[in-house]
């Protein structure tokens, strides 16, 4: 953690980069009078980004995000509702490409809670039992989204539409984008929504630290909505997000408990204040937050994108894909 007011900026950046290499993240306190543009400049220097050089989120992430005060910071309020926690995840681990670094800027902190949580996947990977680690490596995970139609916007259960997710109003275009060797997009059984299923590996080879757990499993498992009044009455598979093993079987309670436990044991918690900037090595450090009350505004900035190497879905996923597309 560094206070920008106490050291010269070049020295700060050099020291911060060393800290991020050693620990996977850096927290810079710029003070409550720092503008969003000043915070953006600092984040860009830490991530090695030029002006107008950002990672892509809209059209690849789970929701579409607006920007803050004419800056490149995306408003994170479009994510999980404030009354439930954001579970640990590596940003866009469900996608074909994901950012090498993520930066967060606290513009306005909530009146109650809203603590930022980080988890070091270097330590977490070592804590995983050999049996669970082997299963994660061999099967991977299916991330499932139940995407509403724009005609349903405004209904109590609406979360994200397929038009928003695939940045198109044309169903044929969405189907073309959503159907690949590792992805399935089909009409939901209700005839209105769309079901999107993506297979992904759950490990990534970090250039400095070797093979690390890298996933959005807790953030996409339907149980993260257990405490939400709108979706808690729905079966897990019918909630906006869910995930299962790569072969289509559900995670057991003991498997989920172990994954939650190793994240908890790897947690670094910090309640950010206005003017705080946090940059994380997305390939090493997962992030989340606690619930909060009151108005809160945090910006998200992504670095250059890293392509995910082609994986090998288990045979069961290929059969699921064939069965869906044959219907």
Image (cartoon, rainbow, N blue to C red):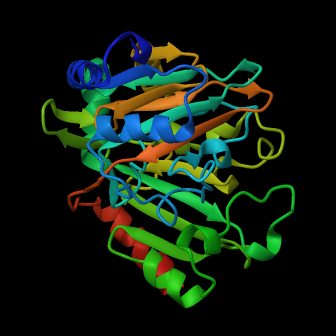
The picture places residue 242, in percent across and down from the top left corner, at 57, 50
What quarter of the picture does the N terminus occupy?
top left
Q: Please provide percent x and percent y for residue 48.
A: 26, 43
- Residue 18 appears in which quarter of the rendering? top left
Identified at 69% across, 26% down, the residue is 291
Q: Is residue 139 visible?
A: yes
Q: In the picture, which quadrant includes the C terminus?
A: bottom right
Residue occupying the point 86% across, 55% down: 156
Extreme-top residue of the structure: 6
* Residue 89 seen from this side: no
Q: Where is 186 relative to 106, above or below?
A: below
- Residue 203 sits in which quadrant? top left
Judged left or right of residue 95, residue 256 is right
Vertical placement of residue 200 versus 45, above or below: below
Along the viewing direction, whichever of 231 and 237 lies nearer the viewer? 231
Tell me how many marks there are: 0
């Amino acid at each position: 953690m560094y206070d920008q007011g106490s050291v010269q900026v070049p020295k700060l950046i050099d020291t911060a980069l060393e800290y991020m290499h050693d620990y996977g993240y850096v927290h810079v306190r710029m003070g409550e009078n720092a503008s969003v543009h000043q915070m953006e400049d600092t984040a860009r220097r830490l991530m090695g980004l030029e002006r107008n050089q950002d990672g892509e989120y809209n059209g690849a992430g789970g929701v579409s995000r607006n920007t803050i005060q004419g800056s490149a910071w995306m408003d994170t309020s479009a994510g999980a509702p404030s009354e439930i926690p954001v579970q640990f995840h590596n940003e866009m681990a469900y996608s074909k490409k994901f950012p090498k670094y993520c930066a967060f800027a606290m513009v306005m902190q909530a009146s109650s809670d809203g603590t930022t949580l980080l988890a070091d996947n270097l330590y977490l990977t070592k804590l995983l039992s050999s049996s669970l680690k082997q299963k994660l490596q061999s099967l991977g995970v299916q991330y499932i989204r139940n995407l509403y139609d724009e005609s349903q916007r405004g209904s109590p259960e609406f979360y994200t539409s397929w038009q928003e997710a695939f940045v198109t109003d044309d169903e044929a275009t969405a189907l073309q984008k959503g159907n690949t060797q590792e992805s399935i997009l089909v009409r939901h059984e209700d005839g209105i929504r769309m079901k999107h299923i993506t297979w992904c590996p759950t490990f990534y080879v970090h250039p400095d630290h070797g093979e690390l757990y890298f996933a959005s499993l807790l953030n996409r498992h339907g149980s993260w909505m257990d405490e939400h009044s709108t979706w808690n009455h729905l079966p897990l598979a019918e909630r906006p997000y869910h995930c299962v093993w790569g072969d289509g079987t559900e995670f057991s309670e003991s498997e989920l408990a172990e994954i939650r436990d190793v994240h908890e044991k790897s947690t670094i918690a910090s309640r950010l204040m206005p003017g705080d900037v946090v940059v994380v090595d997305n390939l090493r450090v997962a992030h989340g937050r606690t619930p909060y009350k009151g108005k809160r505004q945090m910006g998200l900035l992504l670095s250059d994108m890293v392509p995910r190497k082609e994986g090998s879905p288990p045979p069961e996923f290929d059969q699921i894909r064939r069965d869906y597309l044959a219907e």
